[in-house]
Amino acid sequence: MGEQNSPNSTGAADRDLTSLTAAQLAAGLTAGEYSSTEVTRAHLDRIEATEAQIGSFITVTPDAALAAAADVDRRRAAGEELHPYAGVPVALKDLVVTQGIRTTAGSKILEDWVPPYDATVYAKIRAAGLPVLGKTNLDEFAMGSTTEHSAFHVTRNPWDTDTVPGGSSGGAASAAAAFQAPLSVGTDTGGSVRQPAAFTGTVGVKPTYGSVSRYGIIAMASSLDQVGPIGRTVADAAALHQLMAGHDPHDSTSLREPVPDFLAAAAAGTREGSLKGRRLGVVKQIMSDGCASGVAAAFDRVLALAEAAGAEIVEVDMPSLSYALDAYYLLMPSEVSSNLARYDGMRFGLRVEPETGPVTAETVMAATRAAGFGSEIKRRILLGTYALSAGYYDAYYGSAQKVRTLVQRDFAAAFEQADVLVSPTAATTALPFGEEESGDPMALYVGDSSTIPANLAGIPGMSLPAGLAEGMPVGFQLLAPAREDARLYEVGAAVEALVSADRGGPVWQSAPTQYSSEAAAATATNA
Amino acid sequence: MKYQDAVAKYDPVLGIEVHVELGTATKMFDAAPNTFGGGPNENTTPASLGLPGALPSVNGKAVEYAVRIGLALGCEIAESCRFARKNYFYPDVPKNFQTSQYDEPIAFDGQIDVELEDGTIVPVQIERAHMEEDAGKNTHVGGAAGRIHGAEHSLVDYNRAGVPLVEIVTRPIEGAGERAPEVAAAYVRTLRDIFRALDVSEARMEQGNVRADINVSLRESPDAPLGTRTETKNVNSFRSIERAVRFEVARQADVLDAGEAVVQETRHFHEDTGGTSPGRPKSDADDYRYFPEPDLVPVAPPREWVEEIRAALPELPAARRRRLLGEWGIGELEMRDIINAGLLDQVEATVAAGAGPDAARKWWMGEIARLAKQSEVSPEALATPEAVAELQQLVEAGKLNDKLARKVLAGVAEGRGMPAEVMAADGLEIVQDDGALEAAVEAALADNPDVVEKIRGGKMQAIGALMGPIMKATRGQADAGKARELILAKING
Amino acid sequence: MAEAAAITAEQVKHLAELARIAMTDVELERMAGEIDTILSHVARVSEVATDEVPATSHPIPLSNVLREDVVGTSLSAEQALSGAPAQDQGKFLVPQILGEE
């Protein structure tokens, strides 16, 4: 590993606390080199200095974060046994329900909603003593892949503030890439952690379905949603995943078995020769052919590095994947249409009365939903309503569920031939703002085709930086069989080390730290 | 048209959907208490309130109760079944979908025998029994008409939202003929008794624990295809069920006679008039878009578990009633009274403790029920079956007469111990001392020579006129039988 | 293969009613076009969804996840009502419900 990742390499006097990884911060906090209050304040300062240009957050919670930091410092001083990452700050996608802190899902319909309960993930993070810096921006109800669909403001990509950070966890990814937070919690329904990680040069993981509790995560599509960690290194993502994972009786789909040691797996991956004999499967259907040339070049370069390190590159054929996107765009909207029915202005959130006509529960619900949801949400709700309605269910929803079976079968066969499957995470690097206003909604959806299959099959996936193309990060996706998340961390850490050695340092350290004032002005108007 | 004319001309077919609220400690899909009463919105969790991010979790006890019900109705229990979302917007449905079961119910293909008052047995086919959740409660609040403040609105309490329900759906009940109203009520009554016997619900109709939706259709003859049906919702007493069926049969016959078509719709029953009125017509607006509940996993009741539950099923009411009628030799009407009073367990246990069936029934249905009503407690709170059996034994041994026994029972009801203890403590035992009784008899004979003459003349009922003075002299503790023997011995001796 | 017939604005109006979203005619027209475009792509799922392929509703197969019937922590009435747009007498105040008795 590069010198930069070694915990004690940076002297206490001359470092900028925001440039350290979570692992470095955890080590420094444990060693008493600095306090959580200092670390948290440094990140809050960084947010204050850069937020106008980046716009990662919907809500920043400095008081709560500093109070949590002070509590950890006090407990550490008292000699209490603490979680190894206690005191390391974290940012939460604003889809995570936080008692007493408004939770918006990026939507006008929840603009002022302050929940009376905690998501399990949030409860675990607090119990471990990680100060929460705030709630990050997202596409409304996690529907989108640019974070432009937030009802509040756009988020800018720290690598180039004229481009999007990806989405829907764009705020979470940009916060990590812009050194506003060492760790972020995202959610991934069709690539919403992995794709923004790819666009921002960070590491994002979609765990095995059920690895992390969904209780208190505002649902988009229940059978596809999964909470995932974002960090600047594979080890940091592993640490956050480790902390969040585990059975939760509140989530019936949560896995029962003990959580594997992801940190140990990541450490094992950095050992010399860990890739030797590992079979990396290149999926014919998500090959680099359709990718931008810079993306393809970066991907191929990583394959060459891996091969040189002893890995075996095999090609696998997964014919069902050509139907995966279609199945996803039936299953997801169907579940969305039902999950989002509760936003009706009766019990919580926005209530809007119709401008004309009678005021009844029915008309108020319809007016509230008309005013509170953005057009992308409405489109998906109507599409899902159609796919589930009498006479169409079998052809649409039913068939899509069958495709899901075929995708699972293809993955099972592929993992006979390969230990992990690899592909570019996205076909391009981050796109400029407004690129998706092309008129064909399907053209935009196609961008998710490499990430969606993992959600359909419930398997874990990771995006880590493959390098840069024309100065912008390229994502390298790894997929592993269900419950083999540890394999991702092991192979991911090995690939990360290869890339770092190849370029003479980790990708994230090349990220700009100063942002142009033009962007600031543009963001201001947007906000 | 008169009901009799309607059933003479048309063949009625019934279909009944019964919802029963299960008596579990918690709700169907969350750990909020499943309790009646309490302040509004005090029994909710994020899940039963449908808050963003909340998830359901299945109550294992409710599944067990559903299996119990399914087995008692002679159903097959699914090897695997799942939950589905029934999507529709209504303010008392917090998520705007009801979590229910659709194509995979937990129990299906059953049959029960429904016994009518005259002993006629009507078999009813059960199509399915499935698990689901109840909705919250709306209270309509009137107000000045208008769009602004003070307008009509509703208040919603979600305490009931998520309460576990089992819905039991019959196949079409054919061949009931003119007895359709009676069959409908008897079916629901049979279910009610089964729920109580299974201990899965208090099954109180008046509290809405059991609710029935009654489908009625008419056809020209039993060979004709089924006619268009109406569904009268939430009919909540046996009498109302009978009235609703009678009304619908007569109303639909009128519609058909007028050459019109019955509209397929839900209807509401009105207690005051005994009539029904149309609700919303069934239309394609009722497209519930069922799909498998992604937040819950399938329930696959292990076969051994199902067999354990089957083995532990209590004797079902119909079988028990038939057995006890044979064993006790009492009439149908007496039996119905005991069942309706909820005292069958007590009477049976009292018989088991040694009392005769008539005596056991007499005590529970008579004096104990009276005391219970007086003090507004349940009869079983006043005496144990063992105490009642002991009381009856004291009577039969001649130690208590009826009047004294009631005094002793009052003491037992006050919690002063078993009957023998109360009797001893209060000195209520019948005087067995022949000397005192003999003196009282002699005094009575001497004081009433005219009565003595009548008895000598063979008017045996005149003996009664001597009992008053004898009882008075012995402070009521005389054994009446013994006194009668002494009187006859002295007069005839 | 299910060749989807073009979705009309009239059909979208019905969907919007089912989904309780008020929409103008202009929106209905636009949505009809967009939904039609998407459906014309995704309808191809039925090409491979043959009878012998079972449906998958859950990505990771689990069964019999049952909760013990033990009362847990409830929200207080105040918490339950904390987000209510309107309330009265400890209950959620909602506009008049049509079809209610």
Image: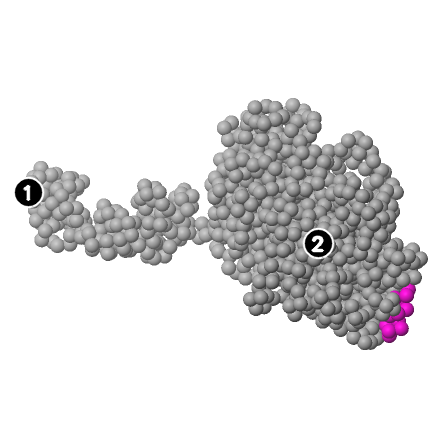
Residue B208 painted magenta: no
Measured as percent of width and height from the top left, residue A176 is found at 75, 57
Give B191 or B267, whichever is nearer the viewer. B267
Measured as percent of width and height from the top left, residue A153 is found at 76, 44
Residue at label 2? Answer: A45
Give B179 or B100, whichever is nearer the viewer. B100
Q: Which numbered tag is attached to residue A273?
A: none
Q: Is residue A500 above or below residue B113?
A: below
Residue B233 in the figure: left or right of residue A391: left
Residue extending farthest to the left is: B446
Measured as percent of width and height from the top left, residue A70 is found at 60, 59
Residue at label 1? Answer: B446
Give SS at disc 2: helix
Residue B20 in the figure: left or right of residue B217: left
Where does the N terminus of chain B fall, quadrant-wise?
A: top right
- Between disc 1 and disc 2, the foreground one is 2
At label 2, the amino acid type is Asp
For the image shown, how many numbered marks are present on the structure? 2
**Spatial separation of the CA atoms under disc 1 and disc 2:** 118 Å
**Is residue A272 at all visible to an observer of this figure?**
yes
Residue A312 painted magenta: yes
Mark 2 surroundings: few (<14), some (14-19) or many (≥20) residues within 10 A: some
Measured as percent of width and height from the top left, residue A521 is found at 80, 43
Q: Residue at x 51, y 57 (%)?
A: B313
Task: Name the main secondary structure of what is drawn in magenta.
Answer: helix
State the image quarter where residue A378 is shown. top right
**Is residue B81 at all visible to an observer of this figure?**
no
Pointer 2 indicates a residue of which chain?
A
State the image quarter where residue B217 is shown. top right
Residue extending farthest to the front is: A13
Q: Residue at x 59, y 48 (%)?
A: A116
| Magenta stretch in the rendered image | A300-314
